[in-house]
Structure formats: C-alpha cells, structure tokens
Image (spheres, helix red, strand yellow):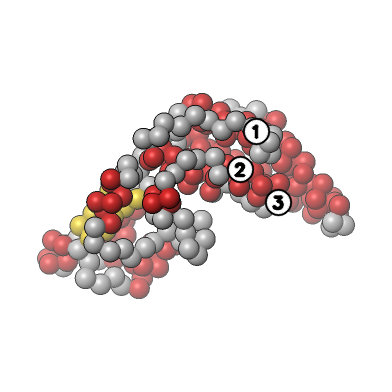
Amino acid sequence: GYLVHKSVFSELLEDALRCEVDAGRGKEAGLQSVRTLRMRLLHWVVDVLRSPLPGDTKTWILRCSERMGMVAVAPYQEANHVNLAVIAYCLCRCCPSNTEAALFLRGVLTNAWHIPAEARLFIERKSDMYGVYVVKPGTLLKMRQLGLQVAVRSFEREVWQRSMNNSAMYLDIIMQFSDYCCFTYVQGLPKVDDILLKWLFVNTLL
C-alpha cells in the first residue's frame, strides 16, 4: 500500500465542493462530487505510484496535483528516454477531469513531457477514447527507432493450426502489456472477429 498525505488532493476536492454549491446545486451535490472525484483520484495516483517512473517524476506529479497544476518547473527529462516520457504522458492522460480545475491539472500534466511529434502519432487518440489502430507495414520498425518499447505477438502459427479462440487471443494480447510497455503489435491475423475487436477497444477505453 501507499501513504498519501490528505493535502495532495485537498484543494481539488474543495474546488469540486465549491463549484457545486456556487452553481446552486446544494451541499449534498457538492459532497457527492467530492466523493466521486476523490475515488477516481485515488485510483489514478496508485497507478502513478506503481509505475516505473523515476521518484522525482512521481513527486512532481503529486506536487502538481496538490497545487492544482500551479507548478512552474517540469521535471528534467533525458532526450533519449522517450519511452518513459510516453509512460508519463499516458498516466497523466488518465488523470480524472470531473471538474474544470481537474481538467486544467490534466492539461498541465500532459503538456509537461517532451515527446517527438513522430511518437505522438502513436499515443494521441483520434477518437479521444480508444487505443486500437490498423497500421501499415514498417510501423513496428519506425516505433522502435523512435525509442518506444513495443511487444510483438504473432498469431500466424495459431491461425494455421486453428488452436486459439477469441477469448484466448484477447488474453494473450493484453498480457503483453507491462509497466515499461504501452504498445502491443499484433501480427498474423488475416481477419479479426468483431467480438475480439470489441474486447480490445473496451480494454483500451480511457
């Protein structure tokens, strides 16, 4: 478990309560907004603390959360540590945005990481929801040249032997992700059943 000081989210929660009250929805609506935001923030911060990010980066994210994004200096980043920057970006992209203050915080956090424009093509979601893409040949090589950690899973043998169903393939694909790996490159499927595609879309839903 983790010990997180209550002040880390106090200003965000006070703002959530104040916004509901000022909008005329009453204190009870404000308290419900606080409970919802607090639960989402706690789940999110656990993911941040469990991540492989450096300790000073985690500290900066917590300090930024405590001050609702009012932190001037972003953490130092090595130019060749693109994969860590992507991990940080993806984690910060999941920051709850229930209120305007939380949405502002998420914007500050996601804009803090130096990620090459070519790498952003693989992490910015066109629908702002799902993270499944059909790509052209040569994409895997390009991703690795950019410094991204990519797991590869080929189903050529299983397709030829007809030895895996959709459930097994789904579990196999999502098991490729790890603390250091945000991408799974799937090969060898001449077609993808609708149900498998649906499960993968739901798994990557923000």
Q: Residue 7: horizontal and vertical position, in percent?
A: 70, 30
Corner quadrant of residue 163: bottom left
- What amino acid does circle 3 point to? Thr
Answer whether residue 175 is visible to the viewer in this image. no
- Residue 46 vs residue 23: left or right? left
Q: Secondary structure at mark 1?
A: loop
Q: Residue 45: horizontal and vertical position, in percent?
A: 56, 38
81 or 173: which is nearer to us?
81
Q: Secondary structure at mark 3?
A: loop
Q: Which residue is mark 3?
A: 99
Q: Residue at x 57, y 42 (%)?
A: 109
Residue 59's place in the image compared with 83, above or below, is above
The label on residue 131 is: none
Q: Residue 187: horizontal and vertical position, in percent?
A: 23, 60
The label on residue 108 is: 2
Say which of marks 2 and 3 sits in front.
2
Q: Residue at x 66, y 39 (%)?
A: 69
Residue 164's place in the image compared with 7, above or below, is below
Q: Which residue is mark 1?
A: 71
Q: Secondary structure at mark 2?
A: helix
- What amino acid does circle 2 point to? Val
Answer whether residue 46 is visible to the viewer in this image. yes
Residue 200's place in the image compared with 47, above or below, is below
- What amino acid does circle 1 point to? Val
Q: Earlier in the sequence, mark 3 or mark 1?
A: 1
Q: Earlier in the sequence, mark 2 or mark 1?
A: 1
Q: Residue at x 64, y 43 (%)?
A: 105
